[in-house]
Amino acid sequence: MEYRTSMDEGGTPCSDSEKIGKIIGLKELSFKNEIKNPTNSFKDRVGALLISHARSWLYNKTICASNGNQGASIAAYCSLEGIKCVNLIPNKLDMGKRAQMIAYNSEIIIKGEFVDETIKYALDDKYKDYYQATPIYNPLTIEAQKTIAFEIWKQRGVPDWIIIPMGSGELLVSLWKGFLELKQAEIIHTVPKLVGVQSALSSPIVDEFMNKKKSDILTTDIRNSHALGILVQEPMYKDLAIKFIKESTGTVIAIPEELIVSSVDELVRSEGIFAEPSSALTLAAVHELNEQKVFDSNDCIVCLITGSGLKAPYILEAISSQTTTSGKGSIIITKLKILSQISLSSIRGISGTKIRDIISSISLAAVYQHLYDLESKGLIYRKKEGKIVLYFISDTGKRVLDALDILLTLI
């Protein structure tokens, strides 16, 4: 590859559990925290590789249809390289992911209710001159994501279990490919057992693995899922995912929605990790499988945390609901939403006008008042580029978002 673009993606921590493992009797529980990537998800590994490839082949525009994280990452790397980016997204998408695309000047086109409907539009003839960055249509996605397996091996050796969220199944396939390559190179001699996790509201891979009939859950119910990042009704990698889970002697599990939300809260309060629901369900899977006596207390277990809770701002509202002072809670939530958008746009900064476009429920004057308050508390800082003032999150602001236990002291 002749060209390489990077924002220091990868090299994310695989940290020992601070509290949860000890409480439930697992001595070696750890979290591979992909939130630490530049746009706060594992997809930055993909964004860096695909846009490097696009630039090497002299493309000046890209097309990406996704459930959000890949689209947000592609938008960021395209912005860095001055490449036009078009993101096709489903109507059901976490607001934070859409906001990132807007912040990085991506053109956004809504197609379909779920990503299964959206991806077919990426093959339209009108995009034949675009670099194809849709995950299932570009095999480099797998090549980028398999590096997570390499890092886990370097950080933990070969774990006994890896817990992986599944939408299309592509991430699980990527990790298995990575571990198989290590084994084929005789670098390792064993491979981990894979656990594929889905929401109980949309679990086509789990259902087929368990030989269950197709779920009768209504589309209206699926729309209520918190795990929007993995809502895929016809997974492209379903057969491969099932094959590899069986080869690894692993298993699958579908997590009820109420456990997904409680796991978001538990990760924040016990481990200081603010994960999006599609990631937090891996912790719920650990609890459920541990209760079923699937694990030995000495097993080395790695939970994959793929994306940040900042991408699903309604989670902020749920966690902040403990505020009892009338009116104060809504002010806190607005400040948190603004702070999260500044964090999600930390590479290039974001203007007050663009924040207002993203959070359209408040006026521009109110946005600037909140920005003044956040800046006076040292949570953000500004830079002037020509006539435009851009806002960036400070180290203190990052600590606030990472901890979340002190969010109610914002005002």
Image (cartoon, rainbow, N blue to C red):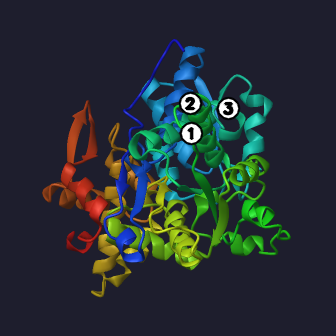
User: Which x, y percent locates residue 112?
Assistant: 73, 54
- Nearer the camera: disc 3 or disc 1: 1
Query: Which residue lies under the disc numbered 2?
Result: 186
**Disc 1 secondary structure class:** loop
Q: Residue at x 47, y 51 (%)?
A: 99
Q: Nearer the viewer, residue 313 or 369?
A: 313
Residue 139's label in the rendered image is: 3
Tag 3: amino acid: Pro
Label 3 vs 2, first from the N-terminus: 3
Query: Which residue lies under the disc numbered 1?
Result: 189
Q: Residues within 10 Å of mark 1 (few under 14, many from 20)?
A: few
In which quadrant of the rendered view does residue 348 lie? top left
User: Is residue 203 positioned above or below 242 on the image?
Assistant: below
Asked if disc 3 and disc 1 are in contact, CB closer than 8 Å, the reply is: no
User: Which x, y percent locates residue 63?
Assistant: 64, 34
Q: Which of 182 and 103 is in front in this view?
A: 182
In which quadrant of the rendered view does residue 373 lie? bottom left
Q: Residue furthest right?
A: 213
Q: Residue at x 78, y 55 (%)?
A: 234
User: Which x, y percent locates residue 201?
Assistant: 69, 71
User: Is residue 374 positioned above or below 316 on the image?
Assistant: above
Q: How crowded is mark 3: few (under 14 residues within 10 Å), some or many (20 or more)?
A: few
Asked if disc 2 and disc 1 are in contact, CB closer than 8 Å, the reply is: yes
Q: How far apart are marks 3 and 1 (CA)?
A: 26 Å
